[in-house]
């Protein structure tokens, strides 16, 4: 029987939402093992001087716990 856990993280990028997701998964992979999926819960942007300066995602990462 497998048991999974969900953890919530926020990641940002100055390039795109896709890059923010990629960076978040890469960073989470450094400390979490057995990552199986990620659910993008929220996407926001920071605007400075009328232009987007940062893309931010809030995601829930699911990983399977070791036995």
Image (cartoon, rainbow, N blue to C red):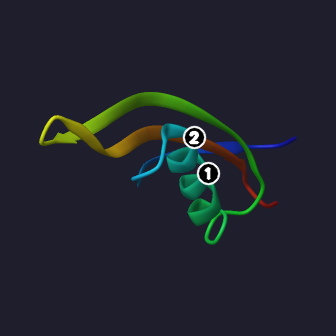
Name the foreground residue: 27 vs 19. Answer: 19
Quadrant in which the C terminus appears: bottom right
Dot 1 falls on a residue whose secondary structure is: helix
Q: Is residue 46 left or right of residue 6?
A: left
Q: Is residue 51 left or right of residue 40?
A: left
> Which residue is painted at 12% across and 42% down in the image?
49
* Contact (Cβ within 8 Å) of mark 2 with mark 1: yes
**Residue 35 image position (x, y, % from top left):** 73, 51
Name the foreground residue: 52 vs 31. Answer: 52
> Which residue is painted at 58% across and 61% down in the image?
28
> Which residue is painted at 46% across and 28% down in the image?
41
**Eyeballing the image, is 54 above or below 58?**
below
Total marks drawn? 2
**Residue 37 image position (x, y, % from top left):** 71, 39
Q: Residue furthest left?
A: 49
Name the foreground residue: 46 vs 48. Answer: 48
Q: Is residue 36 left or right of residue 57?
A: right
* Residue count near mark 2 (Cα–Cα under 10 Å), binned few <14, some 14–19, many ≥20: some
**Residue 59 image position (x, y, % from top left):** 49, 39
**Eyeballing the image, is 11 above or below 61?**
below
* Residue count near mark 1 (Cα–Cα under 10 Å), binned few <14, some 14–19, many ≥20: some
Q: Is residue 26 left or right of residue 59?
A: right
Residue at the disc numbered 1: 22
**Residue 16 image position (x, y, % from top left):** 48, 42
Q: Residue furthest right?
A: 1
Dot 2 falls on a residue whose secondary structure is: helix
> Which residue is painted at 57% across and 65% down in the image?
27
Q: Quadrant of residue 66?
A: bottom right
Measure the alpha-carbon separation of dots 2 and 1.
6 Å
Quadrant in which the N terminus appears: top right
Q: Which numbered circle lies on residue 18?
A: 2
Q: Quadrant of residue 24?
A: bottom right
């Amino acid at each position: 029987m497998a048991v999974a856990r969900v953890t919530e993280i926020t990641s940002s990028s100055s390039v795109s939402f896709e890059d923010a997701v990629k960076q978040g998964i890469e960073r989470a992979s450094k400390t979490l093992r057995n990552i199986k999926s990620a659910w993008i819960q929220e996407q926001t942007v920071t605007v400075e001087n009328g232009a987007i300066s940062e893309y931010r995602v809030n995601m829930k990462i699911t990983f399977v716990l070791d036995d």
